Image (tube, grey):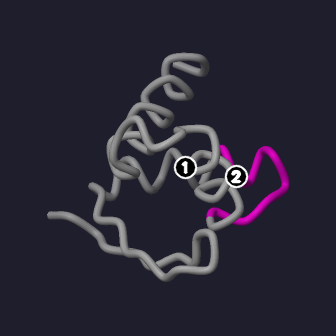
Amino acid sequence: MLEKRSFSLSGHRTSVALEPEFWAVLGEVAARRGMAVSALVTLIDAERGGERPLASALRVFALREANKTG
């Protein structure tokens, strides 16, 4: 089941639907960095450069982070 969350990115509201497991990893990374999940999503959005959809960029980021710690 996908979990949808809404964010404000570059002054626009957007929603992203991800599996809870991906949100969990993103939450853990944000906590380790001392930031909110929304701030982490904003950072990932800025770094993706429009090359891939935001949901895909978030999943790839979460997988890379999970591989670092797993």
Three-letter amino acid code at disc 2? Ala
Where is 33 relative to 7, above or below? above
Element type at mark 1: helix
In the rendered view of the protein, which quadrant contains the N terminus?
bottom left
User: Which x, y percent locates residue 4?
Assistant: 31, 73
Which residue shows up at 59% across the image and 17% down it?
A: 68
Q: Is residue 10 left or right of residue 61?
A: right
Res 69 label: none
Q: Residues within 10 Å of mark 1 (few under 14, many from 20)?
A: many
Q: Main secondary structure of the magenta part?
A: helix
The magenta stretch spans which residues? Answer: 29-37
Q: Which residue is mark 2?
A: 30
User: Which x, y percent locates residue 37?
Assistant: 63, 62
Where is 70 relative to 12, above or below? above
Q: Residues within 10 Å of mark 2 (few under 14, many from 20)?
A: some
- Front residue of this view, candidates 16 and 46: 46
- Is 32 contained in the magenta span? yes
- Front residue of this view, candidates 7 and 35: 7
The image quadrant of residue 69 is top right
Q: Which residue is mark 1?
A: 26
Three-letter amino acid code at disc 1? Leu
- State if disc 2 and disc 1 touch (CB < 8 Å): yes
- Is 48 contained in the magenta span? no
Distance between mark 1 and mark 2 Cα atoms = 6 Å
Where is 17 relative to 66, above or below? below
Which residue shows up at 63% across the image and 70% down it?
A: 10
User: Which x, y percent locates residue 40?
Assistant: 66, 54
**Residue projecting furthest to the right:** 34
Q: Is residue 11 left or right of residue 33?
A: left
The image quadrant of residue 51 is top left
Which residue shows up at 47% across the image and 53% down it?
A: 24
